[in-house]
Image (cartoon, rainbow, N blue to C red):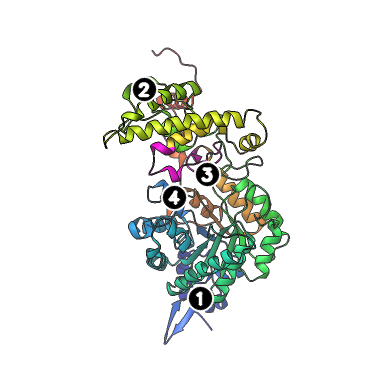
């Protein structure tokens, strides 16, 4: 088929606008891009398989759950995507933002949008509407900008290795979501964040069985050991997924760039097909391989559990009314940097004092006070019991300390908090208090330079499918796109520090002094 030079130029421009990197197209390539409809040729958007087969890089923006939590539309802890129904415009806005930053893919936000997770928040009845609405929003944005649209599967959180019952529950949950993705017009399926290879294999099998030929990208999450939680080494796990028919295999979430890339280098030795890398943009290291294990690098002190930190500044116990603690307690006590731990003597005296008043607790007015007194007395007795049990600092006590729990010191305070916050006590963080995860990670976030280095190294390894997971943001995604030679719309606003009046190249006069004051590189002299 012969093509005029003008037609080649026009389609080449459209081709590049939709994310392709070639600057010219041959007649043969043109035939793969144009489809005849009667007497007219229309642009054919290359699919995922075609792009990967041609050696192209594909950028996929993930991290919707994390970013929407930061914006106040997802509840940390359960992390379910009801925002799709409650505030759909926020999800659409984030889709647009990621496309603007350079994503080739609009991923439907159905992560944790399966039956098992929606049961937790009593919104199982919204399951189908949530999935179909999310797929439609993603499809509309993808069509508007000429991008691919991906459906999404995630770990069920209920799967148990070698357990046929939970395996079947997972299979049915995946089947529902894949069938909805087909109905919603997804171009391919993403199956992500599987810590068990067995569950990932089930997800892949469901995609191949019910996905009507859709490509599948399957990524595992690897925690501190370099293997899955069903004890399969990473290279072997990815090779098995590839052999079972996944179009692209790799890793997402859990690890940051510096601890994910070494695993992919090993995987590259055994995997023949495309690899995927979507790390969390946090500064993990060989001692703290996951963002769940990161601690504050400046203070060298663990981050106290979020709820305890809030309670810590307010005194040891709420007043009888159940409202805020007495003002003079909160006002006069310095704000502690760690959870406030009640001293045994204080507990004992308060408990004895309040226990004597429980006999007077009659009527609704004093009911709350009575419960407070009973709780405090029980707290003291529990502490006495724990002091006896763990007095030798051995056995279970050592196990508790190994998990980051000072059980003798922390349990009474945690019991008090749970009692004072009945609506929230089920959400209370009893996990390792040394971790910044999940609410205090800003101090260990990757810089733009870190992200550029990740994209460069991933490209050099031969990773074709790149993105960022939990913690992703548009400016970081733009860094990935620009390393790969892209110029997304957001590149029109890429930094140009040379034009800064204090950080530019030719800083003179008073601006120079301002810069010196800013960075502290000056000896302050007496002004004229």
Check contact, mark 1 vs mark 3: CB within 8 A. no
The residue singled out by tag 3 in the image is: 448
Q: Is residue 460 left or right of residue 96?
A: right
Dot 3, how many residues are within 10 Å of its Cα: few (below 14), some (14-19), or many (20+)?
Answer: some
Task: Specify the principal SS of the magenta part.
Answer: loop
Residue 33 tag number: 1
Dot 2, how many residues are within 10 Å of its Cα: few (below 14), some (14-19), or many (20+)?
Answer: some
Residue 99, above or below 246: above
Q: Which badge, 1 or 2, comes first in the chain's sequence?
A: 1
Q: Nearer the viewer, residue 236 or 169?
A: 169
Q: Quadrant of the C terminus?
A: top left
Q: Quadrant of residue 119?
A: bottom left
The residue singled out by tag 4 in the image is: 67
SS for dot 4: helix
Q: Position of residue 311 (x, y in %)?
A: 41, 32
How far separated are the C-alphas under marks 1 and 4? Answer: 35 Å
- Verify whether residue 432 appears in magenta: yes
Dot 4, how many residues are within 10 Å of its Cα: few (below 14), some (14-19), or many (20+)?
Answer: some
The residue singled out by tag 2 in the image is: 329
């Amino acid at each position: 088929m012969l093509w005029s030079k003008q037609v080649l130029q026009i389609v080449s421009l459209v081709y590049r606008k939709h994310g392709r990197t070639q600057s010219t197209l041959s007649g043969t390539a043109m035939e793969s891009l144009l489809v005849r409809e009667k007497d007219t040729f229309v642009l054919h958007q290359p699919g995922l398989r075609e792009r990967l087969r041609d050696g192209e890089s594909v950028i996929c923006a993930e991290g919707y759950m994390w970013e929407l939590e930061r914006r106040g539309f997802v509840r940390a802890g359960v992390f379910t995507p009801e925002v799709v129904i409650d505030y759909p415009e926020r999800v659409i806005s984030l889709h647009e933002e990621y496309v603007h930053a350079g994503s080739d893919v609009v991923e439907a936000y159905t992560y944790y949008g399966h039956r098992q997770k929606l049961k937790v928040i009593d919104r199982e009845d919204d399951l189908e509407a949530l999935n179909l609405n999310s797929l439609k929003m993603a499809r509309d944005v993808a069509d508007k900008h000429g991008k691919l649209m991906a459906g999404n599967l995630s770990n069920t959180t209920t799967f148990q290795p070698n357990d046929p019952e939970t395996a079947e529950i997972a299979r049915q949950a995946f089947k529902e979501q894949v069938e909805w993705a087909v109905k919603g017009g997804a171009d391919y399926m993403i199956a992500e964040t599987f810590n068990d290879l067995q569950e990932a294999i089930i997800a892949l099998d469901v995609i191949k069985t019910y996905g009507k030929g859709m490509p599948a990208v399957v990524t595992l999450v690897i925690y501190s050991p370099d293997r899955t939680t069903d004890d399969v080494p990473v290279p072997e796990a990815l090779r098995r997924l590839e052999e079972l028919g996944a179009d692209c295999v790799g890793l997402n979430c859990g690890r940051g760039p510096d601890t994910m890339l070494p695993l992919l280098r090993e995987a590259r030795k055994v995997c023949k097909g495309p690899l995927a890398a979507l790390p969390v943009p946090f500064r993990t290291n060989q001692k703290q391989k996951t963002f769940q294990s990161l601690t504050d690098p400046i203070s060298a002190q663990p981050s106290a559990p979020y709820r305890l930190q809030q309670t810590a500044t307010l005194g040891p116990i709420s007043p009888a009314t159940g409202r805020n603690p007495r003002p003079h307690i909160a006002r006069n006590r310095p704000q502690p940097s760690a959870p406030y731990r009640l001293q045994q003597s204080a507990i004992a005296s308060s408990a004895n004092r309040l226990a004597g008043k429980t006999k007077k607790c009659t009527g609704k007015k004093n009911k709350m006070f009575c419960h407070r007194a009973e709780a405090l007395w029980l707290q003291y007795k529990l502490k006495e019991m724990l002091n006896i049990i763990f007095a030798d600092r051995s056995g279970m006590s050592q196990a508790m300390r190994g998990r980051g729990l000072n059980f003798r010191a922390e349990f009474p305070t945690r019991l008090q908090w749970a009692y004072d916050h009945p609506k929230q006590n089920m959400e209370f963080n009893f996990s390792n208090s040394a971790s910044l995860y999940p609410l205090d990670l800003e101090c260990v976030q990757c810089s733009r330079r870190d992200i550029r280095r990740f994209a460069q190294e991933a490209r050099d390894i031969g990773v074709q499918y790149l993105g960022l997971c939990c913690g992703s943001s548009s400016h970081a995604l733009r860094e990935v796109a620009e390393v790969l030679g892209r110029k997304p719309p957001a590149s029109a606003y890429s930094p140009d520090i040379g034009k800064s009046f204090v950080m530019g190249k030719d800083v003179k006069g008073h601006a120079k002094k301002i810069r010196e004051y800013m960075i502290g590189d000056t000896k302050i002299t007496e002004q004229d």
